[in-house]
Amino acid sequence: MHTFIKHAMGVAILGTLAGALAPAAMASSHREAPFVTQSPKVDGTDFYMFRSYETGRASYVTLIANYIPLQDAYGGPNYFSMDPNALYEIHIDNNGDAKEDLTFQFRFTNTNKDTKLTVGGKQVSIPLVINGGAIAGPNAAGANVRETYTVNVVRGDRRTGTKAAVTNAADGGTTFDKPLDNIGNKSIPNYAAYAAAHVYNVNIPGCSTPARMFVGQRKDPFVVNLGETFDLVNIKAPATEFSANAEKGAKDDLADKNVTSIEIEVAASCLTAAGSSDPVIGGWTTASLRQGRLLNPVPNAGSPSKEGGAWTQVSRLGAPLVNEVVIGLKDKDTFNASKPSGDGQFATYVTNPTLPALIEILYGSAGAKAPTNFPRNDLVAAFLTGVKGLNQPATVTASEMLRLNTSTPVTAIGAQNRLGVIGGDNAGFPNGRRPGDDVVDIALRVVMGKLCTLNLGCAPADAPAGALHFTDGAYLDETFFNAGFPYLKNPIPGSPQTGAVVQANRRAP
């Protein structure tokens, strides 16, 4: 429920009121704050946390943190490497105190192999990330660039806690290869097999059960009609509850975009608090940069700048859509730099939200009336504490994060409801978030009072539009994803055809 309409919002709806449209949603966290738009490599786009529904893996929890939004598959020649000067983290709070108890830290290194060709008797460095040979496995000879990463697990405070390296279960190594982006089918003929070779079984210090890990480019899992949405909800064919195929009536502007995913699947018992009977965990992802940067006026050997100073958090993402459509414009950068323990400063945005008021301003005449219960305790539960009896910790400090009850039974593939909890599937959003949970439709309904109709924090009379079936028209469900780890689809290739086929097509009438 905290999703608050991200993607497209062009909405909707309305029971007997055909033709009414709701306001705009946005991409889960794509370019959500002014400052982070300047550093897309550390822009977190989506965060997922769910009990693994791959057959035989129900005792595990999968954590997915996506970064670098709006990647065009053809975006060479340098493509979309992670920032070697950044610190990417996934945090877990397992006692409800709004502070991290467990943090997975990812650091990246990019190595230019500097492949040279002999041209006119001289050795000359090539300009591409591949050197002419097809790529089939990790650190292939044909790759001119090697991107690797290391992972540490920190117990306690992210900066002062106890740190230890995550190791490869196969050989004890601490360095892992990240696959090249999907350049095209000529460069990487079988990208699915190539990516699969970068799924690692790993050992996490302090956890007796091996985990699985993957970092690499994936198809962007989010759906949204971005262009028309941000043009004052200029939807050409508004979807209404009574329109044919209303939930699939809008286009997905992210259909041809990729992202970069950090994924780790960990035994649930290694994420919950030791010795505690509380199965609820909270999670969020952050990215940090060094406080200082000096630009090199003569950048050579790949050193355009010198970074130094303390880590400074510049991106934060727990539940979807919070910074996009809940936090006020003036505080978006502040939210990205904040920790859950300091979320009291943002409380008014939840207790007195502007989004429902904006929806009423635009579509109130058609029946889209905002809830009247203030403070909005239903949204406090959705955003800040978890819903009692569903995913609220035994002891909780109000703070924004994604919360998951690890004891909730898994809903198998093929039986999941895209509306999650409000659709009768307690294994879905806001009890964690699975890839196939349509958080936009869920958020639209929750912000307009759906929980009031369920007597959760408010009464049905508080939400005149709480029973309306809001939808953004951009459809999403479990069929968009794979049935097992790493769940997200292979990325769109930059060049889906071989050169010979392309030339043949050009000659065709």
Image (cartoon, grey):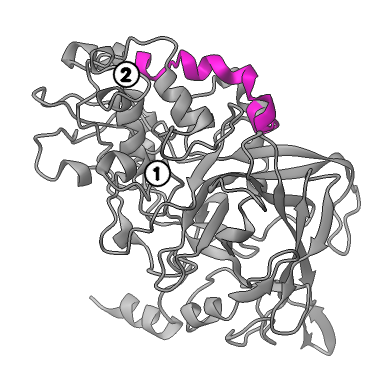
**Element type where label 2 sits in the image:** helix
Which residue is identified by label 1?
A: 429
Q: Please state the extent of the stretch shown in magenta in the rendering.
A: 335-359
- The secondary structure that most of the magenta stretch takes on is helix
The N terminus, quarter of image: top left
* In the foreground, 397 or 165: 397
346 relative to 145, above or below: above
The C terminus, quarter of image: bottom left
Q: Earlier in the sequence, mark 2 or mark 1?
A: 2
Identified by mark 2, the residue type is Ile
Q: Neighbour class for label 1 at 10 Å: few (<14), some, many (≥20)?
A: many
Q: Is residue 508 left or right of residue 335?
A: left
* In the foreground, 453 or 506: 453
User: Which residue is depicted at the point 52% across and 59% down?
Assistant: 61
469 relative to 458, above or below: below
Which residue is identified by label 2?
A: 359
Q: CA distance from mark 2 to mark 1?
A: 23 Å
* Image quadrant in which you'd find residue 83: bottom right
Q: Neighbour class for label 2 at 10 Å: few (<14), some, many (≥20)?
A: many
User: Which residue is depicted at the point 18% across and 36% down?
Assistant: 237
Residue 221 shows which numbered tag?
none
452 relative to 149, above or below: above
Identified by mark 1, the residue type is Phe
